[in-house]
Amino acid sequence: TLVLLHGLSDNSRIWARRTSIDRYATEKGIAVIMPSGDRSFYTNMRYGDNFADFIGKEVLAVAREYLPLSQKREDTFITGNSMGGYGAMKLALNQPERFGAAASFSGAVDIASTRQRHNHNWKRITGGKSIKGTDCDLFHMLKENAGAAHKPRLYVSCGTADFLYHQHQKFIPALKEYGWDVTHYEKPDAVHE
């Protein structure tokens, strides 16, 4: 099962409209769940919905009630791009027992930098409070769950011309420092996709 998260300016239908996800899923024999995350950064919002609980717990539970999907963590994956890349990392780092692997494509992995760029969203999400040292802070969660019994394998990619590339330059060394199994890919001169 693959949970596929959209970016900030999109919605859950973007993957079906702009990719061949249906063909890929059919070829690989996997179920793909594409939930809507609004502009939540896949968090439990102070002034809004609890998207972290919805995506990380409820969506999988409901899908497994209706479809014959594996309950095993090693058969459960989460990925996304941009805001969805952040969401995939956030959910995997916060709930390592749920996901066998997670991937971020052009992800907003240093949320403190992204928060400044999208401050209006973060006021709704946190009520204006700092996210440093919380479950929204990926760097904190890398350290917090470094000793987890089951840690998902991680894949992180970003283009070198992406406006979020500087975030990846800090995130990858932190992943390695805390012993996370990460594969990292940088595409030369690629922009945010």
Image (spheres, helix red, strand yellow):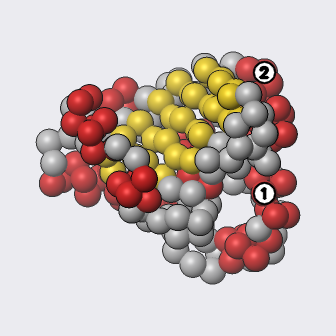
- The residue at 54%/35% (across/down) is 103
> Percent from the top left, x then y, of residue 130?
83, 63
First in sequence: mark 1 vs mark 2:
1
User: For this rendering, which residue is in front, 174 or 5?
Assistant: 5
Image-quadrant location for residue 26: top left
Image-quadrant location for residue 151: top right
Numbered label attached to residue 177: 2
Residues under labels 1 and 2: Cα distance? 22 Å
Disc 1 crowd, CA 10 A, few/some/many (<14, 14-19, 20+):
some
**At numbered mark 1, what does the secondary structure look like: helix, strand or loop?**
helix
Relative to residue 187, is residue 69 depicted above or below? below
Numbered label attached to residue 174: none
- The residue at 51%/28% (across/down) is 152
User: For this rendering, which residue is in front, 165 or 130?
Assistant: 165
The answer to whether residue 143 is seen in the rendering is no
Image-quadrant location for residue 148: top right
> Percent from the top left, x then y, of residue 84?
56, 52
Which-is-in-front pick, marks 1 and 2? 1
Left or right position of 51 against 108: left
Amino acid under disc 2: Glu
Disc 2 crowd, CA 10 A, few/some/many (<14, 14-19, 20+):
few
Residue identified by numbered label 1: 114
> Percent from the top left, x then y, of residue 68?
14, 42
- The residue at 59%/40% (across/down) is 105
The answer to whether residue 114 is seen in the rendering is yes
Relative to residue 114, is residue 108 depicted above or below? above
